[in-house]
Image: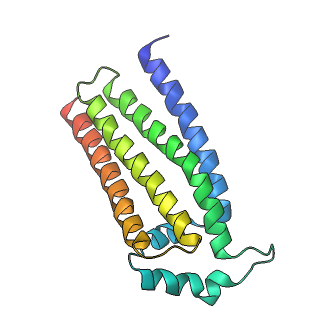
Amino acid sequence: MSARFKNLLFLLLSAVLTYLIHDEMVRWMDGKQVVAFEMLKTEAATNALLSSAEWQQPDANSLTKVDKLRQNTYWDFLYILGYTFTLFFFARTLLGSSHKRLKTMALLLVVAGLSDAIENVLLLQILDGSRGFFPAAMYGFAWLKFGALGVFLGWVGVEVVRGK
């Protein structure tokens, strides 16, 4: 079995896993609402949102938006694995398994994944009532995650245009 075929197979498997996890996450809460929450960088803004009637009002299943965000966050831990593997095998498929900068590029995915996981832990702390520096730290790790993913995708794009 060729390396290219293996990369394509792992890309397909990880993409399907990521899609299924994302589908479950969206069942709990829309991604735009999650990102908007992650971008609250102050304790006051976080307190205002979490204490609002919209976030405290139970739905037909007796779940508040706080409950839904918590469930979405638990699923996000699995989603981190899915999207980092998908992006890694996407890069390997496009650039080839022996690309000289692939390992360095993969470190950006590790940074993004770890930042996302730390962001999730901070988010859960906030939902459990801890505030203080947690919103600002969550905001910082969210930007680190998005920044690392942006640099990774940009770098892959540059390498593809340059011809590997």
Residue at 45% x, 41% y: name it.
Answer: 84
User: At which x and y percent is residue 73?
Assistant: 58, 59
Instruction: Name the side, left or right, on which 23 lies relative to 36.
Output: right
Instruction: Name the side, left or right, on which 65 lies relative to 91.
Output: right
Residue at 59% x, 46% y: name it.
Answer: 19
Residue at 81% x, 77% y: name it.
Answer: 60
Q: Quadrant of the C terminus?
A: top left
Looking at this view, name the residue that lies furthest to the top: 1
Q: How many marks?
A: 0
In the image, 142 versus 16, the foreground residue is 142
User: At which x and y percent is residue 40?
Assistant: 42, 76
In the image, 40 versus 94, the foreground residue is 40
Q: Quadrant of residue 137?
A: bottom left
User: At which x and y percent is residue 159?
Assistant: 23, 35
Instruction: Name the side, left or right, on which 54 lies relative to 63.
Output: left
User: At which x and y percent is residue 100?
Assistant: 23, 24
Q: How is the image coloured?
A: rainbow
Residue at 33% x, 23% y: name it.
Answer: 96
Q: Is residue 37 visible?
A: yes
Is residue 156 shown above or below 57? Answer: above
In the image, 134 versus 99, the foreground residue is 134
Q: Is residue 31 visible?
A: no
Q: Quadrant of residue 31?
A: bottom right
Instruction: Name the side, left or right, on which 58 lies relative to 21.
Output: right
